[in-house]
Amino acid sequence: MSSQTAGASEHDTKQDTGGPIISVRDLRVKYGDREILHGVSLDIQPRETIAILGGSGSGKSTLLRTMVGLEKPASGTVSIHGTNLSRASASELDQVRKKIGLSFQGGALIGSMTVAENVALPLREHTNLAGSTIDVMVRIKLQQVGLIKFQHFMPSQLSGGMKKRAALARAMAMDPEILFFDEPSAGLDPIIAAGIDNLILNLKKALAVTIVVVTHELASAFLVADRIIVLDGGHIVADAPAEELKRSTHPRIQQFLNRVADSDTAEDVDYLSLFMEQLLKPSHMEGR
Amino acid sequence: MRAMLWHRVSDRGRMAGIYDRIVGPLSTIGGLVERGLAYIGSLAELVGQAVAQVFVSPLKRSLNFQRACHQAMVVGVGALPVISFITFFIGVIMALQGAYELRRFGALHLVADTVAISITRELGPLVAAIVVIGRSGSAFAAEIGTMKVTEELDALSTMALHPVGFLVTPKLVAMLVMMPCLTIWADLMGVLGGSVFGVNGADYTFASYLAATLDALYMRDIVTGLVKSFVFGLVITAVGCREGFATGAGSDEVGRSTTAAVVNSIFLVVFVDLVFTAIFYVTSGV
């Protein structure tokens, strides 16, 4: 199992060929005074499929948001194609973002547009393709995710699974080099969730893309990922191929894999003492 | 000695009390002014970004034009019925209120002048602005706020689409074009409302009422109203969109930002109205 610090000094410089497509170095992210990620480092190679696994509050969604430039790190760097997102100009950041696609947990489809218009949006905005060409491309993308019959539906008319598939079609619209998935199977029944996993597997086989899946679903992570990164409390506790991870003796990973709850941290409360303490407080005596 | 010390201590206490009474309210006023200026600064920043986006992506002007046209239909054409009714009624009300005073002086024939001037200089633009705040300012805040809660703004950003350019610029362009148009329409409906009283309650025919209105009006009366309406459009869009972007996490936050958009817009529109009316008064001598 390689640790988070493995290779930390190897990829600090700009690399266009041969190096990692995503490089995260000593990343710290804070919300106010609360630090969510405590010095995370990782590399993702081109055409690799990575699952970032972790429980609620582990910082996995924050890591994803920082990797696509939606959150600013307090310190450390995220580089995509050698471009440091923190130091990139607005136009450089746009260039990077045109090469990535993000499928949001809730879909995040534009509510005032149909499914087809949502998928066409990046194509219309960033290319000079003719309307008829865009229509064909939209149909291809929707066919890939099995939503061709629903192209004229509004997002509010779609089920949760359909929204995720439509969001995936939109994320694929610009034929990105990196596809990010935020909790692709969360909130879905097992059959629909398995369908989404199969979709990711098909994309992995059909397209030469790098895939980063952020999830808390063990089965999904082990099914789709070449390598799994486990986050816990803002730290990477494991970074290894799926089979190797299963053999890990790390107590936190074992706890996660075996679905063992944290020990009950609630303290016993002596309500009678508390009541007496309140009753005999000096403030009650002052009035007498 | 003890008495002297006691006096000194009590003097110090009294001084502290006076200090608190003076400094406390001053610091409160200072805080309010600071927050107000920061708010106006944030509005100016948003408008600046929205205007800059018009020039940033010239290749996509046709798309921006389509979005602006759509917004113009929603903001402008959609508001026509309610603005027509309200300003028509206000025209009748102004005529009735004016006539109540004018007839005491035997000057009922001046009712057309009263209605024309009050509607074109003040009530037309103000009523149109208040209706647009209720319909569109609140809708801007709710739309952008909901998009923020549902991560649609983040989705736009990850697609390299700028939320300000995508959402605010078309609304701003539509509003700047439609507010003066709505104001002209409101002026017409107000005068029409006044004519109902003029024909039935004073000795006017419809034609003579319109002629009296045209005689009473100067071009500057209409232009001052239109200038104000243009600035009102700017304020309503900036406040509505700013409150939308300031929406926090959770659906109750959308309600808060919608309320803030309406209240702040009405306050700022009336404040801007006051400033412009004062400027027009000083510069034109009327």
Image (tube, coloured by chain):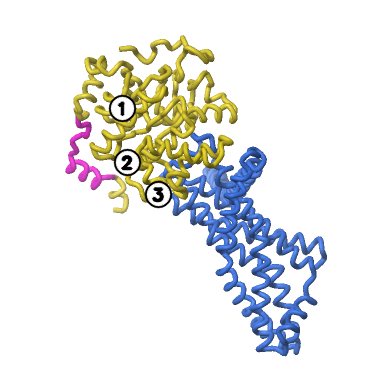
Chain colours: A yellow, B blue
Q: Against A64, is B27 above or below?
A: below
Query: Which residue type does callout 3 highlight?
Result: Phe
Q: Which mark is residue A153?
A: 3
Residue A266 lies in magenta, yes or no?
yes
In three-dimensional space, the C-alpha distance between marks 2 and 1, rounded to whole angstroms, equals 22 Å
- The amino acid type, in three-letter code, at marker 1 is Gly
Q: Out of B175 and A38, give the one closest to the viewer.
A: B175
Residue contact at pointers 3 and 2, CB within 8 angstroms: no
Point out residue B251 in the picture as x, y percentages from the top left corner: 40, 49
Question: For the image shown, how many numbered marks are present on the structure?
Answer: 3
On residue A54, the disc is: 1
Crowd tier of the residue under label 3, counting other residues whose Cα lies within 10 Å: few below 14, some 14–19, many 20 or above: some
Which residue position holds label 2? A161
Give the spatial CA distance, label 3 vs label 1.
34 Å
Q: Is residue A63 visible?
A: yes
Mark 2 residue type: Gly
Assign a secondary structure to mark 2. Answer: helix
Highlighted range, magenta: A263-281
Residue B80, x across and y down, in percent: 58, 67
Of all chains, the one bearing label 1 is: A
Q: Give neighbour class at mark 1: few <14, some 14-19, many 20+ (Cα, 10 Å).
A: many
Question: What residue is shown at x 49% (from left), y 55% (from top)?
Answer: B258
Q: Secondary structure at mark 1?
A: strand
